[in-house]
Each structure stands twice: as structure tokens, then as C-alpha cells.
Amino acid sequence: MADPTLRSQRRLAVVVAVDVVGSSRLMEQDEPGTLAAIHTVFSDIIEPAAAQHQGRLVKTMGDGALLEFASPVEAVLCAVEAQAAVGDLARQRPDGEDAVQLRMGINLGDVVLDEDGDILGDSVNVAVRLESVADPGGICISGKVFDELEGKLSLPFEDLGEQRLKNIARPLHVYALKAADISPREPTAARPSQNQTDKPSIAVLPFANLSGDPSQEYFADGITDDIITALTKTRWLFVTSRSSSFAFKGKAVETEQVARRLGVRYILSGSVRRSGSHVRVSAQLTEAETGGSIWAERYDRDIGDVLVLQDQIAEEVAGAIEPELLRNEGQRGAERSRSLTAWDLVRRGMWEFHKIRPDSHHRARELFLKAIEAEPNSADGYIWLARIEAGLAAYGWGNDPEAGLRSGMEAGLRAVQLDEKNPYSHYAVAVTHVFGGEYETAIRAARRAIGLSPSFALGYLVLGVAYLSTGRLREAIESLEHGLRLSPFDPQNFTWLFLLSAAYTFSGNAEAGLSTACRALSVRPHWIPALKMVALCCTRLGDRQQARSAASQVRSAATEGNLARLIPSPDPAWIDEIEQAIRDALGNGRDR
């Protein structure tokens, strides 16, 4: 296990490097005046601006300075406002007198904190090199910083592409803001409210350490870090950076205030309590607009390998809240009545999709088609069209399942073309191809989705179906169990439970198959496929009475779904055995 004292010497930070342009020339012309002007800039402009934006002036180095921030947004705001103030100061000087001008470079990365409070490391070096390529009065930022500004600040940064910077081995993506484009009023006006962006957004606040032992702080921080990392791989969700979230560590701030400051719609908060070899992690997801909790869970674990435990809990939390966010976003979309964007149409479709009824699935399909028409170069509409086509075919609700699956496969492949790094794109390929009988393609796509996001529950679930369909029952059970553990409350879990029941049963474990089929029925009562699986399991276990009861419910219900489609199985004997169990159970009932 890593030494927590060593971990505490490093932290993620936003580094701002500041340098006076042409200081040697200015010193030669007027050394006392230049020194006084530099002192004024650093003490009266730079340092107060850093404090106002929750940063600190780490040190000055003659004609340069180094600043540290927790938030990329606050760092950029500070830089812009400081450059604007320095520009105003220059305009007050008499004509003909040279004024102090600054260059600034901003980078986000890991820094090493020494005992004197100085910061060191590669991230600092990159910030200094970025400053060196900035225009006088301008700012250059790294691609990491630029990505963190999305949805929060709208500034006219110029994309300079990949740049080779002095003494930096790897090329760096650089964005530049010129002096002419800097206004002290622009950044504040550019701050979005939490409702000004279509993309759902979330901040994960540092989990509180309730153990009473400060040395356990690293464990709580580690879980928070891992959850942020896991959620960041959810491409439809905007996740604030670690540095932005950790700016609120240890502060008693209301959820609504945090959400407003960070411009997010959801807040995930939690706590960690460790006692001996036992740890309890509690987490809660809150919607900022209403202040209401939309999900909460508690995880009790015995500690073995601490880092493995961190990964497991983070994976489970991220996997569990994702479907809750999707469901909530679907409801928001359904309630919105005007100015419908492509994302609004997708959200409305999501709301219909999660009702899981024939009529709602068809309504969802129309909404996803409209979303594609409105924004044909966005992957979201194609992803959800693929999912709905797979659902219509699997549940037997489509008018032409084969044509629907072909359309769904094409939509999934198009989603990958548009957003190859989105795990949902690869899931769209996997789910349509598995029900279309192209199992190896489905397996490759599912593995790719999991590779992009290890906490992606749907990736494991559809991989389990593909394994089931190729007769790899042990692997099917492992994947389906893992997916259900990651997402225990997904609205469609009755389907995954049914398929897990089939995997158990046909691998020779009818008891596990029966309990899992009953779990499916607890999610969707009277569902015919699950009832048929109950009848089969009970027949195998010799419980004729319960088999007859399940078979009677099947006989009295309207037909729903085609088992041969719902279990895309290569072995027709499975379907034959299920149907024979129903006939035998009903025949036994008549004999009595």
C-alpha cells in the first residue's frame, strides 16, 4: 500500500506562470521605475486577483511570478482580469513611456509541494513554456485547461494545435488568447447558469472523512478521485474537474451554492467511515435545482487491498448513479415544451424508452429520428436509435424486427464514427449485433465499451448476453452479475436478470436460475419470459406445483415477447426445453 505521507506531497493544481515582457530592456532604460512598476503589478494586481479567485501567489522571481489554483475556471478568470487591469494601468502612462506588459501560461497537472510551500514538477515547467509562447498581454493555456472551460467560460481562444515547446519532450495542444480579445467584463458575463447548457453536469465533492483519524484522509480522497475518473468517461455527462471540486474540501457550503459556483445541475457528495478492518461509504446524489435527493446508497466492506477497495466502490457508485441521471434527464426533457434541441428530443425519447412499453418504445423511436434530423453529426441520436431498435426486436414489439435490427446496426456503427471514444457508441453496436446474431462483433464492441469506461454497466451486461449466445455460460454469468452489481436499479434489469437466470439454469444451477427469475418478476410482475423460466427451473427441481402455477399464468396472459429473440441462443434445445416445461406443467395440471 502506498505511504499516505508520500501521496500528500503531490496534488493536482492549476499553475499560472507570469513573466514581464522585455524586462531587461525596461531595466536598462529606467531600473528604479521598472522595479516599482513590477512591484505594483505583482502586489496590487496579481496577488489580490489570485486571492479573489481562491488561488495563491506561490512566489515572485524578479520579473516573474508563479500562482496556484484549485480551479481552471478561476485561474483563467484571474489571468484575464489581471491582464485587463495591467492594460488599463499601461494606458494611464504618458505617451512615449514604455509600460509593463505580461505574458501568462496556464497548465493543469500534478505538482510536488515542498516544505516551504513552493510547487515543482513537470506541470510547472509546462506552464512556464506556455507563457513563453504567449503574445505580450496575452495568455496561452494547455489543452487540459481548455477542456475544463467547456460550458463554463466562453472566451475567444485560438486553437494553435500541437506545439513543440522548449525542453518539453511531448507535443502539447496549445490555445491562445490575444491581448486585443481580453475584456475585464467578458469572463463574468460568460459564466453559464446551471440551466444554460443542454449537457447534464455534475460535481463530485470530496468525500468527508468521518473516521476521526486524519491519516485516513487519503482514503476518502482516493475514492472521490476514482469516482470523478469513472464519471468522466461518461461522454454525455459533463463532470467538473478534481481541482474544481476539491476547492470546496473541508468547507461548510450549501449544495445549491456549490452547484451555482461550479455551474452544475447535480452534486454527488458522501462520507467515509473506517473502523478497524471495516469501512462504510455513504453517497448521495442531489439535484441542485430542487435540492432533492434522487439517489442514495451505503456500501459496507471489509478492507483487504485498500486500492482495490477504492476502485470497487468508485466503480459501483459511478455505475449506479448513471441510470438515475439518465432517468432524471429524461423526465426533464419530457417536461420541456419549447425550443427543442436535438438533446431535448433525445431526453424526451429517453423518458419514453424507460417506460418499457410497446407504445412508448415507438414514440421514443420517432423522437430519436427527429434528433438525428435536427443534428445529424451528433452521436446521441444514433446511439439511442440503435438501443430502441434492439429493444423493439428483442421484446417482439417491432413490425419488422429484421429491418429494425439492420437499421439499429447501421445507427450504432454511425455513432462510433461520430464519437469513437464514447462507450455508449460501442454499446449501441454490441446490443444491435448481439440480437442480430453477429456475436463476435458484439463481443468486440462490448469489450471496447468496457475498455473506455470500466464502470460501464451496460458494457458488461451486453457482453454477458453475447457470451450466453455463444454458449460460454460461465463467462456470461460473471459478466451479467458484474453489470447488475454496477447498476442494481436500471429500469430494464428484469431483462438482464432473465438472461442471467437462463445462464444459471442451462449451466446446471436451477436453484440460482429460479431465484434470479423471481428477482426479474419482482421488477416486472407477470412478465411471461420470466414466468416461463420459473416453470423450467421448478420442473428441473421437481417442484411441480410451482411449475404449474407459473405455467398457468403464462397461459392466461397475453403473448409478450419471443423467447427465441430474447435469448439469441445458438442452441434451439434451450427454447424447446422451456416450452416443453410449460406444456408438461399444464398437462400435469389437467391430469390432476
Image (cartoon, rainbow, N blue to C red):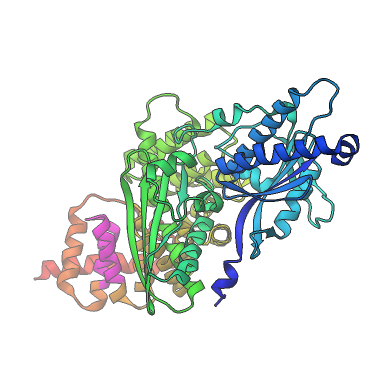
Q: Residue at x 61, y 37 (%)?
A: 77
Question: From what the image shows, is residue 39 above or below residue 505?
Answer: above
Name the outermost residue toward the left.
Answer: 592
Task: Judge by depth and name the residue closer to the eye, 152 or 257.
Answer: 257
Q: Is residue 520 magenta?
A: yes
**Residue 61 visible in the displayed image:** yes
Q: Position of residue 571 (x, y in %)?
A: 43, 68
Quadrant for the N terminus in the image: bottom right
Q: Residue at x 78, y 34 (%)?
A: 101
Dividing the picture into quadrants, the one containing residue 122 is bottom right
Point 61% across, 66% down: residue: 9
Please identify the quarter of the rendering in which residue 27 is found: top right
The chief SS type of the magenta part is helix
- Residue at 39% x, 50% y: name it: 252
Q: Is residue 168 left or right of residue 493?
A: right
Q: Which residues are magenta?
A: 513-537
Observer able to see residue 399: no
The C terminus lies in quadrant: bottom left
